[in-house]
Image (spheres, grey):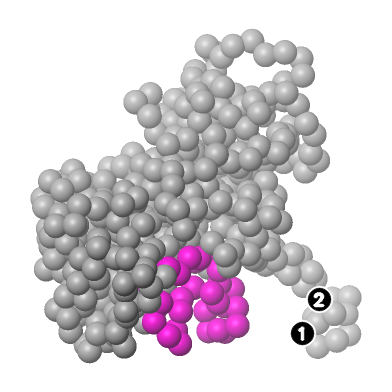
Amino acid sequence: MNFSRPLKGLITGLVLITSLSMASISFAAVVAIENAKVATLTAAGTIESGAVHVSDGVITWVGLGSDAPVLGADAERIDAQGHWVTPGLIESHTQLGIVEINAESSSSDVRVEEFPMGPAFEVRYALNPASVLLPISRASGVTAAVVAPAAGNDPLAGVGVVISLRETLDPAEMLLTENLALFGGMGSRSAKFVGGSRSALMVRLREALTAAKRFSPGRYVADERGYSASDMAALKRWLSSGAPLALSVNQASHILQALALANDFKFPLIILSGAEAWKVAPQLAAAKVPVVLDAMANIPIDFDSLGARLDSAALLHKAGVTIAFTSENTHNAGWIRQGGGIAVANGLPFDAALAAITSGPAKIWGLDDRGVLAKGKVADLVIWSSDPLEVTTHAEKVMIDGEWTSLETRQGRLLERYRDVSNTVTPYGYR
């Protein structure tokens, strides 16, 4: 396992659609989206009557439609009819591609249950490009996602990746960043592994990090509850890689403990969940530690999250903390838009909410070529039916790596199959 910066996506061709309602697909040298309300998520802001030009999977021009460069006869023009165009959404904490049904263990590769395994666990080897959850996310406007291991028997759950939701049969073609971060948790589940106390959990983490610094394969002997040699080797590589620790932690006092841990061992930290992160927002801002939160979480799910509140995103943003939204629901990754809308209703500026599902996660996870609409960036974008943070809005067209992707889902096909039950004599419309 080698921690690395994001991989460059493979560009397989440019698929173009001539209008918002046209189903046939053709190829052209350039695609021009015109008459659009373009949310660039850059200093240029939102451009009314704007245009976006794409060629070979990359954005080549963004600006006022009246200032657009003249295109050749082979260019494909799309009239957005004044609708919003935004960067593709980035979901910051999922198990997309490694689970189908949470309650069916044979369809889940999200964690290790039967024996201790921590830093050496990598989700990338289980990625399934044929997962039925990927089309659902694409149809919701999600074009990239963090895939992370879920908390298992160990407080350090393993290594996550970033995937593109491009249509492919090859898992390797999905990967944007192979060794994104080490993921872990400081909740009650993790504490049970060390006897039930979060104090013991923090001691275990500190002892493991200290031991990893001086780890030598030929001299290491694991105790009954200790890490294996492969875990220690992985932990040592992570410490020297500069990759972050993404830690699921909710209680304010535990967040401060995590900040102290990161400071003592000199690694970047990302807070996941962070129900009470707003209580320590000044400390997070000073340490430049971002927070990935569920903007819809306002009811405590345990004693660690008693301070959950709907305006937490607004409070963190006001304090200068970089934020990103997660739905915390792999089966409905597109709910991050709803979270953004709820955050706006509770004091977060609209632009900041839109950034929290586009440019914010791109910044947090090191996706320098995505998250904004600007010249030279990868052409991941969405044409929306209306305001992208309104719950009734839907994605009309989704482009990933400069290619228009199908918005068909299994659920949609089932709807069409059973929409008309008048022509069957079998009960309940079954065929």
Q: What SS does tag 1 mark?
A: helix
Q: Amino acid at mark 1?
A: Tyr
Q: Quadrant of the C terminus?
A: bottom right
* Location of residue 416 (image quadrant): bottom right
Mark positioned earlier in the residue sequence (1 or 2): 2
What numbered label is drawn on residue 428? 1
In the image, the segment drawn in magenta is 95-123
In the depicted structure, whether residue 384 falls above or below residue 225? above
Determine whether, in the image, residue 44 is placed left or right of residue 395. left
Q: Amino acid at mark 2?
A: Val
In the depicted structure, whether residue 216 falls above or below residue 21? below
Q: Residues within 10 Å of mark 1 (few under 14, many from 20)?
A: few
What numbered label is drawn on residue 421? 2
In the depicted structure, whether residue 378 falls above or below residue 333? above
Image point (41%, 70%), residue name: 230
Q: Nearer the viewer, residue 41 or 339?
A: 41
Image point (38%, 73%), residue name: 229
Image point (36%, 42%), residue name: 363
Q: Nearer the viewer, residue 401 or 345?
A: 401
Q: Are marks 1 and 2 in contact (CB under 8 Å)?
A: yes
